[in-house]
Image (cartoon, rainbow, N blue to C red):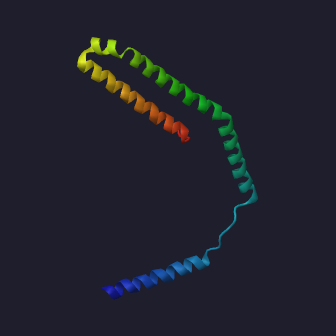
Amino acid sequence: MNNDLQNNDSQLDFLLKNMASGHQPELPSPSLVWWRAQIQKKLAEKQRVERPLVVMRMLAMVVCVAASGAVLAANWTRIASSAGQAGTLLLLGIFTAAMIATGSLLLGESTGKS
Protein backbone atom coordinates (compact mmCIF):
# COMPACT_ATOMS: atom_id res chain seq x y z
CA MET A 1 0.00 0.00 0.00
CA ASN A 2 2.87 2.36 0.80
CA ASN A 3 4.29 1.72 -2.70
CA ASP A 4 0.95 2.77 -4.27
CA LEU A 5 1.02 6.06 -2.39
CA GLN A 6 4.57 6.78 -3.52
CA ASN A 7 3.64 5.92 -7.10
CA ASN A 8 0.65 8.29 -6.94
CA ASP A 9 2.87 11.01 -5.47
CA SER A 10 5.34 10.71 -8.32
CA GLN A 11 2.53 10.79 -10.88
CA LEU A 12 1.04 13.86 -9.23
CA ASP A 13 4.46 15.51 -9.10
CA PHE A 14 5.00 14.81 -12.81
CA LEU A 15 1.54 16.15 -13.67
CA LEU A 16 2.04 19.33 -11.66
CA LYS A 17 5.46 19.98 -13.22
CA ASN A 18 3.97 19.49 -16.70
CA MET A 19 1.16 21.93 -15.97
CA ALA A 20 3.56 24.50 -14.49
CA SER A 21 5.94 24.34 -17.45
CA GLY A 22 3.10 24.91 -19.92
CA HIS A 23 1.69 27.92 -18.10
CA GLN A 24 2.70 31.33 -19.40
CA PRO A 25 1.62 34.18 -17.09
CA GLU A 26 0.14 37.18 -18.85
CA LEU A 27 0.18 40.76 -17.71
CA PRO A 28 -3.19 42.54 -17.76
CA SER A 29 -3.78 45.01 -20.54
CA PRO A 30 -2.87 48.66 -19.90
CA SER A 31 -6.50 49.68 -20.21
CA LEU A 32 -7.48 47.24 -17.45
CA VAL A 33 -4.71 48.57 -15.20
CA TRP A 34 -5.89 52.14 -15.87
CA TRP A 35 -9.52 51.19 -15.20
CA ARG A 36 -8.64 49.59 -11.87
CA ALA A 37 -6.58 52.64 -10.91
CA GLN A 38 -9.55 54.88 -11.70
CA ILE A 39 -11.80 52.76 -9.48
CA GLN A 40 -9.28 52.98 -6.64
CA LYS A 41 -9.01 56.74 -7.12
CA LYS A 42 -12.78 57.19 -6.99
CA LEU A 43 -13.03 54.99 -3.90
CA ALA A 44 -10.35 57.02 -2.11
CA GLU A 45 -12.11 60.26 -3.07
CA LYS A 46 -15.45 58.92 -1.83
CA GLN A 47 -13.90 57.94 1.51
CA ARG A 48 -12.27 61.36 1.82
CA VAL A 49 -15.58 63.13 1.18
CA GLU A 50 -17.54 60.88 3.56
CA ARG A 51 -15.01 61.05 6.41
CA PRO A 52 -16.57 64.12 8.13
CA LEU A 53 -19.98 62.43 8.03
CA VAL A 54 -18.62 59.29 9.64
CA VAL A 55 -16.88 61.32 12.36
CA MET A 56 -20.02 63.34 13.09
CA ARG A 57 -22.16 60.18 13.22
CA MET A 58 -19.78 58.64 15.74
CA LEU A 59 -19.71 61.87 17.76
CA ALA A 60 -23.53 62.02 17.77
CA MET A 61 -23.74 58.44 19.07
CA VAL A 62 -21.25 59.19 21.84
CA VAL A 63 -23.12 62.36 22.86
CA CYS A 64 -26.47 60.54 22.90
CA VAL A 65 -25.09 57.72 25.03
CA ALA A 66 -23.44 60.18 27.41
CA ALA A 67 -26.63 62.26 27.68
CA SER A 68 -28.81 59.24 28.33
CA GLY A 69 -26.32 57.99 30.91
CA ALA A 70 -26.30 61.38 32.62
CA VAL A 71 -30.12 61.51 32.72
CA LEU A 72 -30.25 57.97 34.07
CA ALA A 73 -27.62 58.73 36.73
CA ALA A 74 -29.28 62.00 37.77
CA ASN A 75 -32.68 60.35 38.20
CA TRP A 76 -31.51 56.94 39.43
CA THR A 77 -32.93 57.28 42.95
CA ARG A 78 -36.34 58.32 41.63
CA ILE A 79 -36.32 55.50 39.04
CA ALA A 80 -35.20 52.92 41.59
CA SER A 81 -37.84 53.91 44.15
CA SER A 82 -40.73 53.95 41.68
CA ALA A 83 -39.81 50.85 39.69
CA GLY A 84 -38.92 48.50 42.51
CA GLN A 85 -36.09 45.99 42.42
CA ALA A 86 -37.31 43.99 39.41
CA GLY A 87 -38.01 47.12 37.37
CA THR A 88 -34.62 48.57 38.27
CA LEU A 89 -32.86 45.44 37.10
CA LEU A 90 -34.87 45.50 33.87
CA LEU A 91 -33.97 49.14 33.22
CA LEU A 92 -30.33 48.47 34.01
CA GLY A 93 -30.35 45.50 31.61
CA ILE A 94 -31.93 47.55 28.83
CA PHE A 95 -29.42 50.36 29.35
CA THR A 96 -26.52 47.89 29.32
CA ALA A 97 -27.80 46.30 26.09
CA ALA A 98 -28.09 49.76 24.52
CA MET A 99 -24.52 50.58 25.55
CA ILE A 100 -23.23 47.32 24.05
CA ALA A 101 -25.15 47.93 20.81
CA THR A 102 -23.82 51.48 20.57
CA GLY A 103 -20.29 50.28 21.24
CA SER A 104 -20.54 47.71 18.47
CA LEU A 105 -21.87 50.37 16.09
CA LEU A 106 -19.00 52.67 16.99
CA LEU A 107 -16.53 49.87 16.47
CA GLY A 108 -18.08 49.07 13.09
CA GLU A 109 -17.86 52.73 12.05
CA SER A 110 -14.25 53.05 13.15
CA THR A 111 -13.17 49.99 11.18
CA GLY A 112 -14.94 51.15 8.04
CA LYS A 113 -17.75 48.63 8.07
CA SER A 114 -21.32 49.75 7.99
- Residue shown at the point (48%, 24%) measured from the top left: 66
Place residue 6 in its image quadrant: bottom left
- Residue 114 in sight here: no
Place residue 111 in its image quadrant: top right
- Residue 1 in sight here: yes
- Residue shown at the point (66%, 43%) measured from the top left: 43
Residue 14 or residue 54, whichever sits in front: 54
Q: Tell me: residue 49, above or below residue 16.
A: above
* Image quarter of the N terminus: bottom left
Place residue 23 in its image quadrant: bottom right
Number of dots carrying numbers: 0
Q: Position of residue 60 (x, y in %)?
A: 55, 25
Residue 64 or residue 24, whichever sits in front: 64
Residue 19 or residue 98, whichever sits in front: 98
- Residue shown at the point (60%, 79%) measured from the top left: 21
Left/right placement of residue 51 relative to residue 110 reads right
Q: Position of residue 3 (x, y in %)?
A: 34, 88
- Residue shown at the point (55%, 30%) measured from the top left: 58
Left/right placement of residue 10 relative to residue 5 reads right
